[in-house]
Image: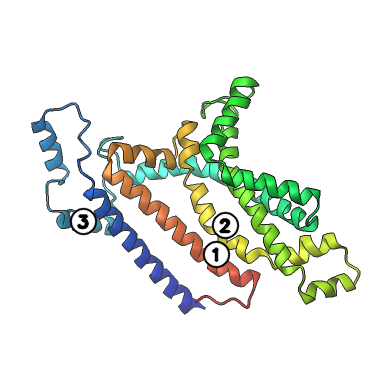
Amino acid sequence: MAEKIIRRVLLAAFSLFVIISITFFLMNLIPGDPFMSEKATEESRAVLIAKYGLDQPLLVQYGKYLAGLFHGDMGTSYVLQKGRAISTIVTDAFAVSVKLGIRALLLAVLLGVPLGCVAGFFKDKLPDGILRVTSAIGISVPGYVIAAVLMLVFAVKLRILPVSYGRPMGEIMPIVTLAVYPACYLTRLTRASILEVLGQDYLKTERAKGMSELVVIFIHALKNSLVPIITYLGPLTASILTGGFVAESVFNVPGLGRYFVNAISARDYTLIMGVTIFYAALIIFMNLLCDILYQVVDPRIKIG
């Protein structure tokens, strides 16, 4: 098993290298430069471009960037926080995002998985129908619409929650916005997984022993339905922990998602690269972790 894990780690490192390379070249193919919006003369812009080495051939810039990464240097911000180290920006922003993300992830799992079991328990009955409709709506509605509705209802109409993130209880609406889609998706995924295993022989045996349908579904069936749920939780965790782009932008949360959106708008090349690398590395790590967890849930699954 250790050999297979090492092989997967090496494959993950190669995947990250490919992502870095593609992002770097695609980003630099976009016309313009980070200093286009600067209120400066052409001479001043030329000085800034030369200072950061953006006047050099693209392959030279690429080589220097990789060399810096190899030594743990992701560069400094060109525009949004001039001169500040990208590693520091990403670390500070991630600390904000992860605080919201963990709560949103817990809310999504604590709602989605039990509701999926309930839907499976009441298959084709009224509770199942209600959960299927509401979860379909939650998946279909864009995040910015959910954020706008929450703001309209709880901040404007009822005036019980603040719009600004920094105020007391200001985290509630961003957390709910982040949790709605994954909770609804987990509800449907859990229901489908539960129904897939309900007809298997080992569950018929449990029923024959006199166990109630509630115990059969919530304990025995759920345990063997966890593989697709774990598969989804890997990228979901990475996505939520790095901050929802919509939620952080709408509620003005100083997290990783908002920095990424602003970096793209400002053409802050090094910050775009830093956030992309961090996000990609987190997704790759979570997928690798899920592959290992598969064996804990079902020892028949082997790491390939």
Per the image, the residue denoted by label 3 is 62
Residue on which disc 2 sits: 233
Rate crowding at label 3 as few (under 14), some (14 to 19) or many (20 or more) other CA atoms within 10 Å. Answer: some
Q: Closer to the N terminus: mark 3 or mark 2?
A: 3
Crowding at label 2, few (<14), some or many (≥20) Cα neighbours within 10 Å?
A: some
User: Can residue 159 be seen at all in this image of the molecule?
Assistant: no
Q: Residue furthest right?
A: 210
Apparent side of residue 14 relative to residue 47 in the rendered image (left or right): right
State the residue at coordinates (20%, 43%). Answer: 31
Residue 134 shown left or right of residue 76 in the figure? right
Task: Name the kind of residue labelled 2 in the image.
Answer: Leu
Q: In this view, does 34 lie to the left or right of 247?
A: left
Q: Where is residue 143 in the image (x, y as percent from the top left)?
A: 53, 40
Q: How far apart are marks 3 and 1 (CA)?
A: 32 Å
**Spatial distance from mark 3 to mark 2, Cα to Cα?**
34 Å
| Identity of the residue drawn at 57% across and 41% down | 141
Q: Is residue 229 above or below residue 199?
A: above
Q: Do the residues labelled 3 and 2 touch (CB within 8 Å)?
A: no
Circle 1 Cα neighbour tier, 10 Å, few/some/many (<14 / 14–19 / ≥20):
many
Q: Kindly indicate the quadrant of the structure image that contains residue 245.
A: top left
Mark number displayed over residue 56? none
Distance, label 1 to label 2, CA atoms, is 8 Å
Say what amino acid the circle numbered 1 marks: Cys
The answer to which of 165 and 187 lies nearer the viewer is: 187
Q: Residue 153's image quarter?
A: top right
Rendering quarter of residue 19 = bottom left
Nearer-N-terminus badge (3/1) = 3
Q: Establish if 61 lies above or below 227.
A: above
Give residue 211's position: percent from left, percent from top: 88, 66
